[in-house]
Image: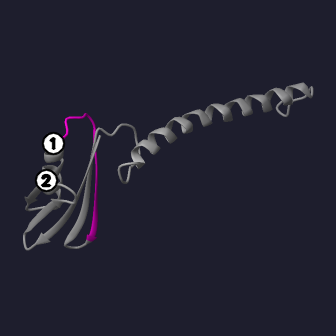
Amino acid sequence: MGVYTFVCRSSGSEWMAKQLKGELEASAATPYELQRRLVAAASAADSAAGVQSSFAMVTPSSAVFQVIIGAVGGGAAIGGGAAAGGAAAGGAAAEAPKAEEKKEEEKEESEDDLGFSLFD
């Protein structure tokens, strides 16, 4: 998995981006086209499947763009180590609803043990 962070700036009618720690660069007329080119450049540098991206304007003429290659599952990951933590948390979250279902079933059974029902 690769995380590529870019600093984007507008000068006149052109948007330019440079990778924060690396050599990838791109430029385009619009922020949208710049994002498309940066995703293509990051995908070419890392052959893993799955791409997530995030674009955040800082000022009207600057932004931060992050491309995560090899990302699986939902949710955003900030930084390199957060993605692994998010994947582990996703498994724990999947188990939680099962425990809640069991509690609800136990409540239903305990009402039957009293010998009456509110809906009779």
What's the colour scheme?
A: one colour
Does residue 89 appear to the left or right of 115 in the view shown? left
Q: Quadrant of residue 33?
A: bottom left
Q: Residue at x 7, y 74 (%)?
A: 12
Residue 23 % position (x, y): 13, 55
Q: Residue at x 21, y 70 (%)?
A: 62
Tell me whether circle 2 and circle 1 mark residues in contact (CB < 8 Å).
Answer: yes
Spatial CA span between label 2 and label 1: 9 Å
Residue 30 % position (x, y): 12, 61
Q: Amino acid at mark 1?
A: Ala
Q: Please say whether residue 76 is one of the residues in the magenta stretch.
A: no
Does residue 108 appear to the left or right of 45 in the view shown? right
Residue placed under numbered mark 2 in the picture: 24
Residue 10 % position (x, y): 14, 70
Residue placed under numbered mark 1 in the picture: 45
The boundaries of the magenta stretch are 45-58
Q: Amino acid at mark 2?
A: Leu
Disc number placed over residue 36 in the picture, else none = none
Residue 15 % position (x, y): 12, 65
